[in-house]
Amino acid sequence: MNTLCIVESAYRATLEEQDDTILWLVRAMRGAGAQLSLLLRGNAVNYLTPGHDCSSLSIAGQKLGHPPVLDADVRAVAAHGVPVYVVREDLAERGLAPSGFASGIIAVSRAEVPALFERHERIWHW
């Protein structure tokens, strides 16, 4: 069964983990044979921006041991054969351009999202 995983709320669980929990889950499930696609929309489109650095983050004097590198996590998902889509208008609203991201990232318009839903048997919205 083909499943579309939508990530819209960015930076979930990145203080406890070295990456976004859902990106890790998608990669792990793909490794187990699941047929998945990933759609980044809303604030999650920021995951594509290279160079995010939170290595200086500390809480109560404790430095974060494994800071997230979300653009690398998205590249790893794509490298595992998962189609990665991003909503073009969400990029534009944040001043980001679809060029310059990892190869294989597919920009779609908001108007194309319903057709993307139709191509999948299940939709998981995180």
Image (spheres, rainbow, N blue to C red):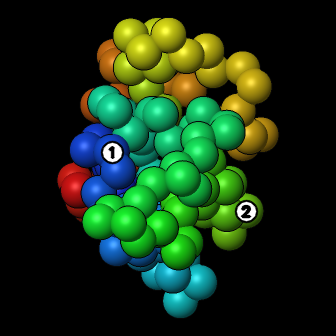
Total marks shown come to: 2
Answer yes or no: is residue 102 visible: yes
Q: Residues within 10 Å of mark 1 (few under 14, many from 20)?
A: some
Per the rendering, the mark at residue 79 is 2
- Of pointers 1 and 2, the one earlier in the residue sequence: 1
The answer to whether mark 1 and mark 2 are in CB contact below 8 A is no
Using the image, determine if residue 113 lies above or below residue 120.
above
Using the image, determine if residue 113 lies above or below residue 9.
above
Answer yes or no: is residue 116 visible: no
Per the rendering, the mark at residue 112 is none
Q: Quadrant of residue 89?
A: top left
Q: Position of residue 50 (x, y in %)?
A: 67, 38
Using the image, determine if residue 56 lies above or below residue 88.
below
Q: Position of residue 72 (x, y in %)?
A: 67, 55
Using the image, determine if residue 119 lies above or below residue 58.
above
Write the residue at 35% across / 51% down: 11
Pointer 1 residue: 10
Q: Amino acid at mark 1?
A: Ala
Q: Amino acid at mark 2?
A: Ala
Q: Position of residue 85 (x, y in %)?
A: 51, 39
User: Helix, strand or loop at disc 2?
Assistant: helix
Q: The N terminus appears in which quarter of the rendering?
A: bottom left
Q: Residues within 10 Å of mark 2 (few under 14, many from 20)?
A: some
Q: Residue 1 versus residue 32: which sits nearer the camera?
A: 32
